[in-house]
Image (cartoon, rainbow, N blue to C red):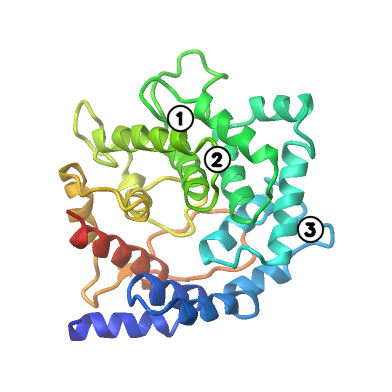
Amino acid sequence: MSMEQAEVTAWLLSGDPAIRWQTMRDLLERPESEWQAEQERTQSEGWGARLLEKQDPDGRWGGGLYSPKWISTTYTLLTLRGIGIPRACPQAKRGAAVLLDGMLGKFLDSDFRHNLARMDRCIVGMLLELGVYFQVDDRRIEAIAQNLLDERLPDGAWNCRKGRDRFVHHSSFHTTFNVLEGLRDYLELQSGPLRPALLEAEQQALEFMLQHRLFRSSTTGQVIHPRFATFRYPHRYFYDYLRGLCYFARANAPRDPRLQDAIDLLKKQRREDGCWPTHSRISGLVFFDMEKGKGPSRWNTLRALRVLRWWNQST
């Protein structure tokens, strides 16, 4: 490890428990007993503890299930998921159960299936992720996963407007990654019967993203939207190329030359001090900002280093 790398790592380890435990696990390969002890602290210290303190008496956050953004139950639980609050955290488990009950229904019945059919696939993907991670372990999880399999477009991925717009024929990057992150939690944490089909669906969706080199038009080669070529965290429901790279790294996907543009952009956006910037935040209500200003970002630096570690080690 170079002096610069050592200094950046020390800076990460001086941050919130959310950053520390993931740095220990993903960058330093510390023993599980060490990083798990640090992960437990996210419930009593720092960002995780502050969000848990904001929970309403009825188990929700912000007085709502999906809105107001970004203080509702859905988005608070997604932030806690990113922080890595332990799966067994009682408050988070209660919130996830309240969320699924309120958004879809408590039972796998006709009302549940009606609610599921009319919901945006972005939200369905989020519900799968949160239900699996926070151990809402019942038959509804399999029904949610099956719905996502059934709702793919011919190009292999997803668009939240499918079913509402008869002209939709191309998948959305935003929707695709909200779904993929739910599938990935299922694949990593659940051992249900849909696993083979979900693995196949994941591979098809990743091929769709590779055809676009994560942020370019597959026909013109131009950047699809300027926001796709920057990054921010929490990313909420929005897609950007670093979110895409993080997924490929998490899935330990094979190194593909079609990712080189995104890797080069990531390296280019590194600051002179060896860190990555915060970039702009996504407007909306927040309980508090985990990071402020336009200086170096521990979240983005951790995420970027995790990606480069995977890239340099993959074959």
Return the residue at label 3. Answer: 59
Task: Report the quarter where the N terminus lies.
Answer: bottom left
Return the residue nearer the eye: 6 or 268.
6
Could you tell me how far apart the alpha carbons at marks 2 and 1 are, in whole angstroms?
10 Å
Return the residue at label 1. Answer: 158
Within 10 Å of the Cα at label 3, are there few (<14), some (14-19), or many (20+) other Cα atoms? some
Q: Is residue 157 left or right of residue 311?
A: right
Could you tell me how far apart the alpha carbons at marks 1 and 3 are, in whole angstroms?
31 Å
Residue 125 has which mark?
Answer: 2
- Kindly indicate whether the residue at mark 1 contacts the one at mark 2 (C-beta within 8 angstroms): yes
Return the residue nearer the eye: 79 or 286.
79
> Looking at the image, can residue 268 be seen?
no
Residue 55 has which mark?
Answer: none
The residue tagged with tag 2: helix, strand or loop? helix
- Kindly indicate whether the residue at mark 3 contacts the one at mark 1 (C-beta within 8 angstroms): no
The residue tagged with tag 3: helix, strand or loop? loop
Could you tell me how far apart the alpha carbons at marks 3 and 2 are, in whole angstroms?
21 Å
Q: Earlier in the sequence, mark 1 or mark 3?
A: 3
Residue 154 image offset from top left, x and y in percent: 39, 20
Q: Is residue 115 left or right of residue 76?
A: right
Residue 212 found in image quarter: top left
Residue 54 image offset from top left, x and y in percent: 72, 67
Residue at far top of view: 166
Residue 262 image offset from top left, x and y in percent: 23, 50
Residue 228 image offset from top left, x and y in percent: 34, 45
